[in-house]
């Protein structure tokens, strides 16, 4: 990542879009956060992760901007249970115990897995060997494995959700 990453506010400001005063000067930033909360998630994957919460810490690891992590934290703090039937990040964020976001740690998963995952793992006295990554990108999985972690590459439209359920079950030491 660049030494100085732009914040979502920087990006919106640099767009130099002037809106009618009825929208308010923070309209685009508010809209960005609202759109992040409405991002569609893979409900099947979140249902699987929810089923393992009693045995594992579930952390969302994302190469994303600050607006995503701020929105995630905000919506996660409001709900006590996942919103069944919801297909949005706001409805399911509560399944996750934490988030690691590239904009916050200043590293990308594939380019610097130690910089990306290391601080979080250290904070909880864990190492890569104690962690399993589920990711759609091969380079992220390879980088994670290269540090001694376990990884499952899973793509929503290409793989069956039972593959994730079985892999996580085996990793936790029991059947699917």
Image (cartoon, helix red, strand yellow):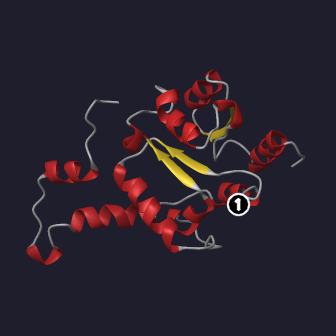
Q: Residue 61: x and y, percent? A: 53, 44
* Residue 141: quarter of image: top right
Q: Residue 144: x and y, percent? A: 60, 29
64 or 128, which is in the foreground?
A: 128
Residue 55 lies left or right of residue 99; in this view the side is: right
Q: Is residue 74 above or below residue 122?
A: below
Mark 1 residue crowding within 10 angstroms, few (<14) / some (14–19) / many (20+): some
* Helix, strand or loop status at disc 1: helix
Q: What residue is drawn where x is 62% and y is 39%?
A: 125
Q: Residue 107: x and y, percent? A: 41, 33
Residue 48 lies left or right of residue 22; in this view the side is: right
Residue 16 lies left or right of residue 64; in this view the side is: left
Q: Which residue is mark 1?
A: 50
Q: What residue is drawn where x is 78% and y is 49%?
A: 165
Q: Is residue 154 above or below residue 48?
A: above
Q: Is residue 72 above or below residue 83?
A: above
Q: Quadrant of the N terminus?
A: top left
Q: What residue is drawn where x is 46% and y is 25%?
A: 111
User: How many marks are shown on the rendered structure?
Assistant: 1
* Residue 140: quarter of image: top right
Q: Seen from this angle, which residue lies furthest top?
A: 146
Q: Residue 148: x and y, percent? A: 67, 25
Q: Seen from this angle, which residue lies furthest bottom?
A: 22
């Amino acid at each position: 990542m660049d030494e100085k990453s732009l914040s979502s506010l920087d990006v919106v400001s640099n767009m130099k879009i002037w809106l009618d005063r009825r929208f308010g000067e923070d309209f685009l930033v508010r809209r960005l956060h609202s759109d992040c909360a409405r991002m569609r998630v893979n409900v099947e994957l979140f249902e699987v992760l929810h089923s393992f919460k009693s045995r594992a810490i579930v952390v969302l690891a994302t190469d994303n901007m600050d607006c995503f992590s701020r929105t995630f934290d905000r919506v996660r703090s409001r709900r006590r249970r996942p919103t069944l039937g919801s297909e949005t990040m706001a409805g399911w964020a509560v399944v996750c115990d934490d988030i690691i976001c590239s904009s916050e740690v200043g590293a990308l998963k594939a380019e610097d897995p130690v910089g990306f995952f290391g601080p979080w793992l250290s904070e909880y006295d864990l190492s890569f060997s104690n962690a399993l990554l589920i990711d759609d990108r091969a380079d992220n999985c390879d980088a994670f494995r290269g540090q001694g972690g376990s990884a499952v590459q899973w793509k929503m439209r290409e793989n069956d959700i039972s593959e994730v359920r079985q892999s996580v079950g085996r990793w936790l030491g029991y059947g699917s």
